[in-house]
Image (cartoon, grey):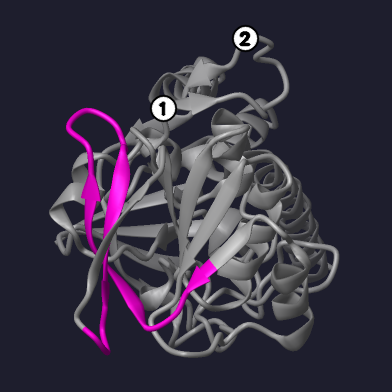
Amino acid sequence: MTEEKVNVLIIGSGPAGYTAAIYAARAGLNPVMYQGGQPGGQLTITNDVENYPGYPDGINGPQMMVDFQKQAERFGTDVRFGLATQVDFSGYPHKVIIDDKHEITANAVIISTGASAKWLGLESEQRLNGMGVSACAVCDGFFYKGQDVVVVGAGDTAAEEATYLSNICNKVTMIVRRDEMRASKIMQRRVEKAKNIEILWNSETEEVLGKDEVEGVRVVNNVTGEKTEIKATGFFVAIGHKPNTEIFKDFLDLNDAGYIITKSGSTKTKVEGVFASGDAQDFIYRQAVTAAGTGCMAALDAERFLAEKEDELEEEEVAEKA
């Protein structure tokens, strides 16, 4: 096991991690970032991003993350490949193991490991990801304005996505596995009030149709066995997200869904010197721009924490000399 000491360690990339890196580097905190299992995060599987400020003509998701990385490196961030596989926040400074072989001791840790969308597991779903298949209606719904789309799911997320899409699309078909929805009553009422939303009960997706882009969906009724093909250009999977926070569960407070709980109005966790940003702690908005905002907050919180630590050490030194 090799060992290394750093001032600020950023775990994970994406808008939150890179923004934290930019602010931390500009503040002279010498941040080291490990990009994680999916460098750049979920935006690397997003073709077009049109709702992030500063890109008037839109931008390709992977290219956007390249731009973020270049900006972080420009100010001196040490960006590295690698995955945090274990942490120990029981003492101070904090310890993080990278790839089960490299131990880092850090004065401050910024977590930006994000969350991963849950998928159905279909080959066609993955093949057409970004070509009509999406896990975010707010991100991609605009591209299907006036078209027919399908939403899979029965919870609040699915109901919210379907309702959002109903305002811009011609028709929204919801595929619900059971004979009832899990969504809250208020969300169900919103779905029911939308005249262009149709619900297929007791139904499951057998295949997403199309060679190079989504052309439709084949659905099977799990009670009768009857199969139906629905014409659609967009296929939105809304069965939830899983935050990438498993390695922190023994040291940080997580909510029931696994998102890191932070102190109100900040990115501070229950452990002094550990901060959480982006989709690892945000289960409400989950947008690139809000992730970037919390990345900025995390870097500022870390900067203030380290400054306070330095003041404490200076006071102790003065007291010892006296």
> Mark 2 = which residue?
57
Front-most of residues 173 and 4: 173
Q: Residues within 10 Å of mark 1 (few under 14, many from 20)?
A: some
Q: Looking at the image, which residue is at 50% across and 59% down?
A: 173
Q: Quadrant of residue 16?
A: top right
Residue 106 colored in magenta in the image:
no
Question: Does dot 1 land on a helix, a strand or a loop?
Answer: loop
Percent coordinates x, y for residue 59 in the rendering: 52, 17
Percent coordinates x, y for residue 201 in the rendering: 44, 80
Q: Is residue 291 visible?
A: yes
Give the residue type at disc 2.
Answer: Asp
Q: Name the image quarter holding the N terminus.
A: bottom left
Q: Quick check: 93 above or below 91?
A: above
Q: Quadrant of residue 131?
A: top left
Q: Residues within 10 Å of mark 2 (few under 14, many from 20)?
A: few
Residue 207 colored in magenta in the image:
yes
> Mark 1 = which residue?
47
Does residue 259 appear to the left or right of 97 in the view shown?
A: right
Q: Looking at the image, which residue is at 61% across and 54% down?
A: 286
Give the residue type at disc 1.
Answer: Asn
Closer to the chain start, of discs 2 and 1, is 1
Residue stretch rendered in magenta on the structure:
199-224
Front-most of residues 66 and 77: 66
Does residue 218 appear to the left or right of 233 in the view shown?
A: left
Percent coordinates x, y for residue 27 in the rendering: 70, 32
